Image: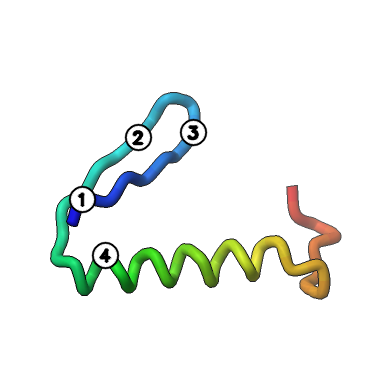
Amino acid sequence: MIIKIDFGDDFIQFISCSTKVGRKINCIEKDFLKWIFDEENNTKYWL
């Protein structure tokens, strides 16, 4: 599985890994995005 990681500002990294690892990375990314955009978290000091 090839995974694309976009860091913004035209910096994109591609990594190759097993499908099992790729699925775990995708799950971690989804959980992280849910956590970041959860309004119940204290975001007062976040940029």
| Mark found first going from the N terminus, 3 or 4 | 3
In the picture of the structure, the residue carrying the numbered disc 2 is: 12
Q: Nearer the viewer, mark 3 or mark 1?
A: 1
Q: Amino acid at mark 1?
A: Ile
Where does residue 23 sit, x and y in percent of width and height? 30, 69
In contact (CB < 8 Å): disc 3 and disc 1: no
- The answer to whether residue 15 is above or below residue 31 is above
In contact (CB < 8 Å): disc 2 and disc 3: no
In the picture of the structure, the residue carrying the numbered disc 1 is: 2
**Quadrant, the N terminus:** bottom left
| Mark found first going from the N terminus, 3 or 1 | 1
**In percent of the image, x 38 and y 30: which residue is there?**
11
On the rendered structure, is 20 left or right of 34? left
Distance, label 3 to label 4, CA atoms, is 21 Å
Distance, label 3 to label 1, CA atoms, is 18 Å
Distance, label 2 to label 4, CA atoms, is 17 Å
Q: Quadrant of residue 7?
A: top left
Q: What label sits on residue 22 in the rendered view?
A: 4
In the picture of the structure, the residue carrying the numbered disc 3 is: 8
Distance, label 2 to label 3, CA atoms, is 7 Å
| Mark found first going from the N terminus, 2 or 4 | 2
- The answer to whether residue 32 is above or below residue 7 is below
Q: Amino acid at mark 2?
A: Ile
Where does residue 28 sit, x and y in percent of width and height? 44, 70
Q: Secondary structure at mark 2?
A: strand
| Mark found first going from the N terminus, 4 or 1 | 1
Crowding at dot 4, Cα within 10 Å, few <14 / some 14-19 / many 20+, comes out as: some
Crowding at dot 3, Cα within 10 Å, few <14 / some 14-19 / many 20+, comes out as: few
| Mark found first going from the N terminus, 1 or 2 | 1
**In percent of the image, x 21 and y 73: which residue is there?**
20
